[in-house]
Amino acid sequence: MSFFQWHPTYKTQYWTITNGGLTLEHHLTAYAGANALALAKIDFGKWYWEIVLNVVSTQTIIGVVSPSYAITEQPLGYDSQSWGLNVSSGLIYNSNSSSAYGPSSTNGDVIGIALDMDAGKIWFSKNGTWMNSGDPAAGTGEAFSGFAGGFRPAAYSQDLGAILDAHFDNADFDYSPPSGFKAFEDMNALNMWSASRCSAKALVTNNGLTFDRTGTNGVTTCAGTRQVSDAKWYWEIEIVAGGIADSVGVINEQWPVQTQQIGYDAYGWGYLSTGQSDHANVKSSFGDSWTTGDIIGIALDATNGRAWFSKNGVWQGSGDPANDLNPAFTGITGLLSLAGQSYYSTAEQAGKFSEASLTYTPPTGFYAWDYDPDFNEVEPSTIGFSAFVDAFNLSDMGISVGIGFSAEIHGSVAVRNVGFTAGIGFSATVEYRKSFDRSFAAMIAFSDDIGGTDFTRWLKANADHVVYRYFARLTGGPDGLADHQLSGLKSLQFRMRNGEPSYLSVVLKYDPTEAEAIVARQNGQIVVEMSGFIGGVESLREELLRAKYYSHRYDRGGLSQSTTLVGYDTREYPSNRVALENVTRETLLADGRMQFRCANPDFYLRPGDVATYGPHEITVGTITCIISPDFQYMEVAEAQA
């Protein structure tokens, strides 16, 4: 699935997405509001895209939404978190207020959108002519201003039959972007060195992954295009040549392009080739020196303002990013980017920004630099793992054999006060001989029950000798084929909503022999089952969930290979009252709704439930969950009023 298309789940049910994710078709019923958002979001920079009006309705609105926008059937611009142009009337809308801006448009017209996130402005054009005498290149005549952070393209239609085509790529444009603006799809190149953020003698090559020094010796600096302000990130810089009087590190948005080492001023935090750390031109003894052939790893916790550096896989200064110990720097602030600096004319630094390109594994809980959490919350590239634990004396522990991994836990002596959570559907084995104070829960993500069997009671009754097995298969009936058992189950991710499509992603170990079987069953369903074995005999098997197959893809990197299957299902859930536990963050969204992040998922929780935490009581609107042995969380967002 391309990153630059309409989002398969961030839409109301009335849009059908076709043409490789680029076309929206309004179906099901007339006079029903249909909103859709793009997958990729825009944090900074100047970007351009087009919407072709194949068939318009009386209420077709093109625009953008903020990160706090909640999808409803209301038109874009009817709330404070969306901004739109009604193409039929030429009016622009925000906060349910309208004003005249441009001419009316109709079938066949092309609406151009120029979004400048650096200045916080947006413009609209019709067939190549900017409305209201606007000039995006000059920054004048904008439709709206005051934007900041994380915006997505959006489209709305009210009537049955509307058809809109998105042009996100230069090759598809009918008209040229304004000067200084790039195609929306060029954001794919955000994870690289930025030629515009390099000093005069720097040369960016290798599709943006390498920067060299040209000409005579002298300090040359270069920064990356991407800027982050939260989450945990990891990347590597390979010192292809140089490593003498050089530096690598992190800079913020106030860093001026200059000819000084990273860390020379208050806007940079650097690891020098001499082994010193440097910030505000205060150099301190830190780690080993480095030179040609070395690979420097950088771990950045942008949320908490901390950074660590490694040399050839060894964390310097006794650093331990996974456990938040001994960072090289603390107090890092601002919109943060990667940066490098070299001195000699032959110097060259190559960035390793994708997981596939990394030489060493990122620390636990850190993303590869090219990862986008918003995109990957919907469809992960790989969160898979395989965990094998020999438990000789596990006491007062909680072990989640949960949704999303292959786990085997063998206890030969004693397992005390251990809570096992058997999650949705992966190859899990739990074996032990003596055990005390155990708690078991069968967790079901999308199903309301498990076929009428009292599964929890059965688990408790057989707790001393049950072995759990999880299976997944792809049904073949709709394609006239037998069901295919999927192997190598690794991980899972889901997003649950009440009465709207819920998303399920299953990650498998890559197996080329399965490719043909998956391709042949694209009209089937992904089915996850759980079995209980006693004495090697299968005593119980229950279906936990199923979702309609939507897509699959293969990810092959230097460290791992995987296959990801994606499915959707729509259900209505009854309402229960649930207390949220293990809350690590509570957020008041811009529209007044509450959102909670929990360290451990609660698979009994459903959209529509009344959730309580401290003085708060909310109706649950959306549940998003990602689980791995190293990284897991559940986010619970309040339903729209």
Image (tube, grey):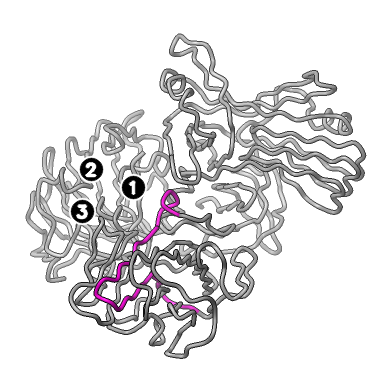
SS at mark 3? strand
The quadrant in which the N terminus is found is top left
Residue 183 is labelled as 3
User: Which tag, 2 or 1, sits closer to the chain's start?
Assistant: 1
Q: Looking at the image, do the residues carrying marks 2 and 1 touch, with CB atoms under 8 Å apart?
A: yes
Question: How far apart in space, not on screen, are marks 2 and 1 (Cα)?
Answer: 10 Å
Q: Which residue is mark 2?
A: 166
Q: Which residue is mark 1?
A: 38
User: Residue 627 or 128: which is nearer the viewer?
Assistant: 627
User: Which tag, 1 or 3, sits closer to the chain's start?
Assistant: 1
Which circle, 1 or 3, is nearer the viewer?
3
Q: Residue at x 45, y 85 (%)?
A: 279
Would residue 261 appear left or right of 535 to someone viewing this image? left
Magenta span of residues: 332-358
Q: Is residue 333 magenta?
A: yes
Which circle, 3 or 2, is nearer the viewer?
3
**In this picture, is 44 found above or below 215?**
above
Question: How far apart in space, not on screen, are marks 1 and 3 (Cα)?
Answer: 14 Å
Find residue 122 and report its horizontal and vertical position in percent.
22, 62
Q: Residue at x 46, y 64 (%)?
A: 590
User: Residue 452 or 591: which is nearer the viewer?
Assistant: 452
**In this picture, is 118 found above or below 541?**
below
Q: Residue at x 24, y 72 (%)?
A: 213
